[in-house]
Image (cartoon, coloured by chain):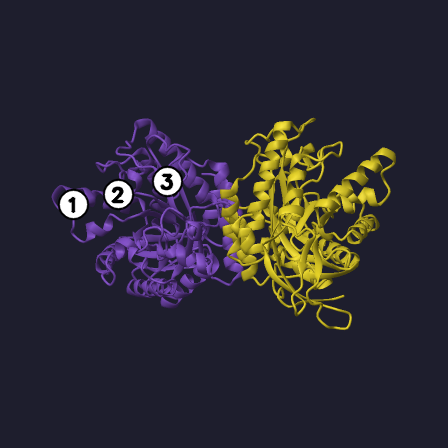
Chain colours: A yellow, B purple
C-alpha cells in the first residue's frame, strides 16, 4: 500500500470492549471485521430501475440479478437516473414510482444513493422549447422541488447541475436550459438550482458536476463560492474513452481543485476495454458505432489503468468518492466501458478493483486480544465494522474524528 | 461601408450654428470636419519612452520621429509600459519620470493614454521572490497606489490585472504574483487590485485583460461581477502570430463577452506580415527566432486581415477600442508584427487602416448650408469636429447621446 493511502485514508483506532454489565472485557480474543467503506465506491446503476420494477423476465432477469449481485459485492454507492427527458417525457407524468423502487432497493442493500442530474441542458425536457425563459425557470424549479421532495430519505445526494461550463454556449441543438443559462448567467443559474434543492432537503449533499477540468471549471467553482453558493462536493467527471489521463494529469486536476478545500467526488469514471475512441472527437456523443467490442488486450489495459486511477484518487485526502460509468458493457455510446462484459462475466478490472476495495483497502476478519482495560488497537479505513465475541456480534463505526474513543458494548 | 457600422457607429447629428450675438446663422455655407475619433484606435507605444526622453541620437532619433508622426497620423490612443520588472528593476527606483515624459507627450499630441499592466505574473519584480505572500500583497498594493497616483491626470486608463486566468497555475517559473494569486484565488486578487486602483483614481477607466478567450475568461468575468468588482471595460488580447482568427471566431468571442453588456477593448492585436508561427507552440514566448522577416506576400495578407479584423470589431456596438501590437517590426518576439517595417516605411496594412480610420470611417471637410434656423444635419462618427465659417473655426463634439442638440457659437 502506498504511503499516501496509509497517511490520508487510514486511522489508528482504539476500541474499548465492554460487557453487558459495563465492565471491560479484559484479556479476551475478539474478532473485528469491516462491513462497509465510508469512502464511496459507486457506479452508475440505471439498470436497477427496470430490474427492481420487474421489467426483466426469465434469462434477462437472471442476468440482471447477477449484475446486481456483482454491483453489491464491489460497490457501496449507486447513481440513479433523473434525466428529465426520460424521467418525465410527458409533462406531469414523471416515472417517480419506478425510480423510488430502485432507490428503496439500494437502501435495503446498504447502498448510498445519488440522483443525477436535476438540471442539465442535454436530455432536458423537450417540452420546455415552447416556453418563455421565465416559464422554463419555473418548470425547472418545480421539477427540482417535486423530485427532491419525493425522494427525501431515499436520495439525499444530488448532482444538482451538470456541465454548467458549456451550458450557455452549447450549440449542438436548441434546448430550454441553454436558453435559460444564457440569459441568467452560469452563476445565477447554479445559485437558483442549489437554493431550490437545498430548500427542499436541507441536509442533502449537493454537488456541482462537470466534465470540464480546465481552468474554466476551476474558476466557475471559485465564482460560485464567492457568490455565496454552498457547494458540498465538487464533482469531476473523467470519461476516458479516448485514453487514460495518467497519474500526472490526474494529480494536476486534483491540485487545481483541492485549493477550495472541499470534498471531491469523481462522479463518472470511464476506462474502456476496447479500441480507444479517436482523439479528434471533441464531443464524445458524436462517436456512434454499431459495434465496439471488448478485447483481451483492452481488458488488461483497462485493469491496470483502473488500479492506477483508483489508487491515485484514493490517495488524495479530499477525494471522498469514485463512481464507475457504466457497470456493464453496451450502455452509453455502446462502449466497452463496463467492469462486466455483456454476458455478465467479470473483466480483470472488476477483479482488480475488488482486490483493492475489499482486499488491500479493507479489514478482513482479524483476531485481537483485549488488554486489561478491554481495549484493542488497530489501523483501518473509515467505515462500518463488526466486533464478534463468543458468537455475539456488535457493529461499530470508525471515523477519523473519534477513532480513539470507540466503545462497543456486547 | 457595412450596415452594422452605419447602424452601430454612426450618428445622425443636428448642429445649430449661432452667430456671436446668439442669432442663428441662417442660409450660409459652413464646413465641418472631423478632428478626432471617440473610438480608440490605439497602439502599443513603448518606443515613446526613449524617444520623449531624448535617448535616441542622430539618425535613430530621426527614425523615432518618423515613427511618432506615423503613429499620430493613424492613432488617437497609446498604451505605455508599466511592466514591473522593467519599471522598477531595483526596489524604490521606479522609472516614473521617464514614463511621465512619454505620457505628457501623448497628451500634448491628443492621444488617450493607457498604462499596461499594474499587476501581472510575467515580468513582475524579481525582488518579490524573497518575500512572504503578505509582503508581496503589500508591495503590489503600494506599487499600484504609487503609480496610479503619480500618473493621475497623465494616465486615467489602466490594464489593472493581466492574464488572471493563468496567473495561479502559471508554471514556467516561480514568481511572486503566481504565489499570491494561488493563495488568494483569482477573484480576490482581482478585487484587491481593482479596489486599490479605484481608490487612487476614482474616475479612471479600469480594465481586466486576458489572452484567454475560452469560457474560462468569460466565467472569470462573470465571477468578478457577481463578487461586486466594478470592471469598466473587458480587455481581450488577440495576438494572432499563428494566423488570423477569422470573422467567425471573432464574432463568437464577441458574442460570449457581449452578454455582460460592458464595453470591450481589443487591447493587444497582432497580425504578422511574415511566416506564421508554427501551430504547435502553446506559449508564444517559447518561439525564439533570430530573424523573422516581413515578406511581400505576408504584408498583403496582413493588410487584408487587418481590414477584416478592424471592420468586424468596429461593427460591434460594444467594442470601443482596438490597440495594435506593435507599431513597428522587431519588438515582441522579434515578430514582423508592425504596421511599419524596421526602416520606418509603411506596410500596406498601415495604409489600409489609415484609409479606414481617416477615410471611410471619417468625416472629411464637408460643405453644408445652414437652414433658416441655422441648422445643419449630417451623419458622422462620434468624436471631435471643427466647424468653419468665413475663416473662423469652432470645435464641437459629436456623441451618440446628444447628437441632435449640438450648438456651435461662432
The residue carrying mark 1 is B61
Which numbered dot is residue B70? 2
Chain letter, disc 3 residue: B
Asked if badges 1 and 2 are on one and the same chain, I answer yes
Question: Given contact means CB atoms under 8 Å apart, are the residues at marks 2 and 3 in contact?
Answer: no
Which numbered dot is residue B361? none
Which numbered dot is residue B284? 3
Which image quadrant is residue A241 in?
top right
Mark 1 or mark 2, whichever is nearer to me: 1
Q: Residues within 10 Å of mark 2 (few under 14, many from 20)?
A: some
Tell whether B260 sits left or right of A190.
left
Q: Is residue A289 above or below residue B391?
A: above
Quarter containing the C terminus of chain B: bottom left
**For the point 24% across and 50% down, which residue is it?**
B48
Tell whether A367 sits left or right of B373.
right
Asked if badges 2 and 3 are on one and the same chain, I answer yes
The CA distance from mark 1 to mark 3 is 31 Å
Chain letter, disc 2 residue: B
Mark 1 or mark 3, whichever is nearer to me: 3
Which image quadrant is residue B22 in?
bottom left
Residue B208 location (% of width, % of height): 43, 54
- What number of labels is visible? 3
Tell whether B365 sits left or right of A21.
left
Which image quadrant is residue A135 in?
bottom right
Q: Is label 1 in a helix, a strand or a loop?
A: helix
Q: Is residue A374 above or below residue A300?
A: below
The CA distance from mark 2 to mark 3 is 28 Å
Q: Is residue B259 visible?
A: no
Q: Is residue A226 above or below residue A183?
A: below
Amino acid at each position: 500500500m502506498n504511503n499516501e493511502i496509509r497517511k490520508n485514508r487510514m486511522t489508528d483506532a482504539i476500541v474499548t470492549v465492554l460487557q453487558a454489565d459495563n465492565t471491560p472485557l479484559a484479556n479476551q480474543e475478539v474478532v473485528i471485521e469491516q462491513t462497509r467503506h465510508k469512502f464511496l465506491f459507486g457506479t452508475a446503476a440505471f439498470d436497477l430501475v427496470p430490474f427492481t420494477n420487474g421489467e426483466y423476465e426469465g434469462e434477462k432477469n437472471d442476468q440482471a440479478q447477477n449484475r446486481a449481485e456483482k454491483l453489491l459485492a464491489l460497490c457501496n454507492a449507486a447513481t440513479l437516473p433523473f434525466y428529465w427527458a426520460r424521467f418525465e417525457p410527458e409533462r406531469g407524468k414523471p416515472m417517480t414510482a419506478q425510480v423510488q423502487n430502485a432507490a428503496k432497493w439500494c437502501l435495503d442493500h446498504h447502498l448510498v444513493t445519488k440522483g443525477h442530474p436535476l438540471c442539465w441542458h442535454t436530455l432536458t425536457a423537450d417540452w420546455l422549447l415552447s416556453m418563455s425563459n421565465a416559464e422554463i425557470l419555473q418548470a425547472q424549479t418545480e421539477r427540482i422541488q417535486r423530485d427532491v421532495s419525493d425522494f427525501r430519505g431515499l436520495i439525499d445526494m444530488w448532482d444538482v447541475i451538470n456541465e454548467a461550463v458549456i451550458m450557455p454556449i452549447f450549440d449542438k441543438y436548441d434546448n430550454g436550459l441553454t436558453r435559460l443559462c444564457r440569459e441568467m448567467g452560469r452563476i445565477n443559474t447554479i445559485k437558483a438550482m442549489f437554493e431550490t434543492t437545498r430548500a427542499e432537503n436541507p441536509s442533502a449533499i449537493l454537488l456541482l458536476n462537470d466534465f470540464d477540468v480546465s481552468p474554466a471549471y476551476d474558476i466557475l467553482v471559485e465564482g460560485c463560492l464567492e457568490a455565496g453558493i454552498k457547494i458540498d462536493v465538487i464533482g469531476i467527471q473523467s470519461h476516458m474513452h479516448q485514453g487514460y489521463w495518467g497519474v500526472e494529469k490526474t494529480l494536476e486536476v486534483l491540485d487545481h481543485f483541492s485549493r477550495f478545500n472541499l470534498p471531491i467526488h469523481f462522479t463518472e469514471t470511464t476506462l474502456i476495454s476496447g479500441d480507444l475512441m479517436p482523439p479528434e472527437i471533441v464531443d464524445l456523443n458524436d462517436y456512434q458505432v454499431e459495434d465496439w467490442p471488448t478485447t483481451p488486450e483492452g481488458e488488461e489495459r483497462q485493469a491496470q489503468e483502473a488500479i492506477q486511477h483508483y489508487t491515485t484518487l484514493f490517495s488524495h485526502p479530499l477525494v471522498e468518492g469514485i463512481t464507475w460509468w457504466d457497470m456493464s458493457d453496451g450502455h452509453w455510446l455502446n462502449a466497452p466501458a463496463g467492469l462486466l462484459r455483456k454476458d455478465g462475466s467479470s473483466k480483470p478490472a472488476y477483479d482488480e478493483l475488488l482486490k483493492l476495495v475489499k482486499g488491500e483497502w479493507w479489514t478482513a476478519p482479524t483476531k485481537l486480544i483485549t488488554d486489561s482495560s478491554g481495549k484493542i488497537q488497530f489501523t483501518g479505513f473509515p467505515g462500518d465494522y463488526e466486533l464478534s465475541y463468543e458468537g455475539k456480534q456488535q457493529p461499530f463505526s470508525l471515523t477519523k474524528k473519534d477513532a480513539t474513543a470507540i466503545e462497543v458494548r456486547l
